[in-house]
């Protein structure tokens, strides 16, 4: 009976991701052949679990140890209009930084805390120490119509079509905020290289939001 219930939960999880493994398979997030992951828990299990999940609202049934950085150096520039609302990375981006800022080992999931394999330097976000977001595209700030108007070089997110089916606000923002997953899809739902939500050939991705 317990096994059956587990199967149902797994089936529901799979069916919620369009295509399931067919999309994540073969991507950088396909951990099914990684030797650092225990055999019975490769694949989805590196990030999700069916039981005793880390309680994070932004990801269902999260299984990975989260970043240990308590305070990042945030993005700023003289022309950046989001500085009044920018904060430490939101929960959704923290999930990415759990592996990508290089402070937590890849195999630290499901309660393991003694891992020794860290993300390759080429995929590290946050500099050598992992806590510097000042040289990355800004995240975790409000991108509202008001910001677009005051900036003058952005499309208003609630009325502009993203090209993904709905508005920028609906398809790319999280409670009107920019996060890593504004541009990326962790499961490769869109089948675009670099796990992007759309191709950036001819700056298509950038020009979805930036009116330049
Ligand atoms: C690299 C980490 C990672 C892996 C591997 C991963 N996920 Fe996710 N998953 C996430 C994150 C992060 C979210 C939060 C929402 C988002 O960013 O898309 C999420 C959200 C979800 C959701 C809820 C939202 C949605 O997109 O429907 C489901 C269901 C899900 N994942 C299932 C799976 C399954 C099934 C697998 C294995 C085929 C898998 N995930 C592999 C990181 C991962
Ligand atoms: C469990 C750890 C883990 C989590 C969580 C995770 N990643 Fe990754 N990600 C990896 C690994 C490992 C690679 C491969 C790095 C390498 O060796 O090049 C990778 C690669 C990538 C790449 C490069 C893909 C390519 O083909 O160039 C992107 C983009 C990426 N991740 C985005 C994200 C985003 C966005 C999130 C959060 C929504 C996230 N990742 C969460 C482990 C993770
Ligand atoms: C504004 C869009 C945008 C945001 C926000 C964004 N990325 Fe990216 N990311 C890209 C693009 C475009 C690429 C493709 C390579 C390039 O042009 O640098 C990329 C590449 C990557 C890569 C591959 C390594 C590399 O440098 O090529 C990783 C890993 C990655 N992003 C992770 C993240 C994480 C983690 C976050 C949040 C902290 C994030 N990204 C936020 C657009 C974005
Ligand atoms: C989902 C929407 C979105 C996407 C996609 C996006 N950006 Fe942005 N970007 C923003 C917003 C909003 C700001 C904040 C603008 C401001 O206040 O100056 C910003 C800020 C910036 C800044 C800093 C501006 C400053 O004054 O400091 C640069 C540079 C930039 N983006 C370049 C890019 C590039 C290059 C791409 C494509 C790889 C891209 N953006 C994709 C929404 C986006």
Image (cartoon, rainbow, N blue to C red):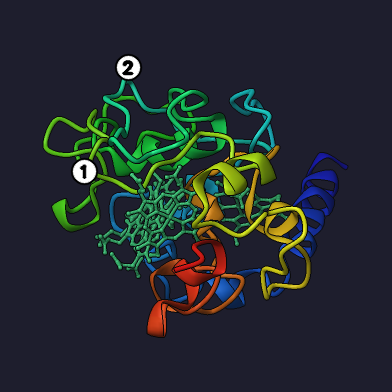
Local packing at callout 1 (Cα closer than 10 Å; few below 14, some 14-19, many 20+) is: some
Element at label 1: loop
Above or below residue 176? Residue 197 is: below
Q: Quadrant of residue 111?
A: top left
Left/right placement of residue 141 relative to residue 118 reads: right
Outermost right residue = 1
Task: Say which quarter of the image contains residue 127.
Answer: top left
Residue at 84 percent of width and 49 percent of height? 4
The answer to whether the residue labelled 1 contacts the one labelled 2, judged by CB atoms less than 8 Å apart, is no
- Of all residues, the one furthest to the left in this rendering is 128
x then y, percent, for residue 109: 44, 35
Mark 1 — residue? 117
Image quarter where the N terminus lies is top right
The answer to whether residue 23 of the structure is visible from this angle is yes
- Residue 129 position (above or below residue 17): above
Give the distance between the C-alpha atoms of the residues marked 1 and 2, in whole angstroms.
Answer: 23 Å
Disc 2 beta carbon < 8 A from ligand 3? Answer: no
Camera-near label (1 vs 2) is: 2
Residue that numbered label 2 is attached to: 71
Let me know if residue 106 appears in the view. Answer: no
What residue is drawn where x is 68% and y is 46%?
A: 145
Q: Position of residue 71 (x, y in %)?
A: 32, 17
Residue pictured at 63% horizontal, 29% vertical:
53
Quarter containing the C terminus: bottom left
Q: Nearer the viewer, residue 20 or 36?
A: 20
Compare residues 29 and 186 and report the one nearer the observer: 186
Q: Which residue sits at x=38%, y=70%?
A: 194
């Amino acid at each position: 009976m317990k096994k059956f219930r587990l199967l149902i939960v797994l089936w529901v999880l799979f069916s919620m991701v369009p295509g399931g493994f067919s999309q994540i398979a073969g991507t950088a997030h396909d951990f099914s052949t990684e030797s650092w992951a225990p055999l019975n828990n490769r694949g989805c299990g590196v990030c999700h679990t069916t039981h005793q999940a880390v309680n994070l609202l932004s990801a269902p049934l999260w299984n990975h140890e989260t970043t240990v950085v308590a305070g990042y150096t945030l993005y700023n520039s003289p022309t950046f209009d989001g500085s009044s609302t920018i904060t430490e990375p939101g929960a959704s981006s923290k999930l990415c930084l759990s592996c990508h800022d290089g402070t937590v080992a890849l195999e630290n999931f499901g309660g393991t805390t003694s891992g020794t394999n860290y993300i390759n330097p080429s995929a590290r976000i946050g500099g050598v120490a992992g806590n510097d977001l000042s040289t990355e595209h800004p995240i975790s700030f409000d991108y509202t119509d008001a910001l677009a108007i005051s900036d003058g070089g952005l499309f208003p997110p609630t009325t502009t079509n993203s090209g993904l089916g709905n508005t920028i606000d609906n398809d790319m923002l999280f409670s009107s905020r920019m996060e890593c997953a504004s541009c990326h899809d962790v499961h490769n739902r869109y089948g675009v290289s670099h796990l992007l939500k759309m191709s950036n050939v001819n700056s298509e991705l950038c020009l979805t939001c930036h009116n330049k």
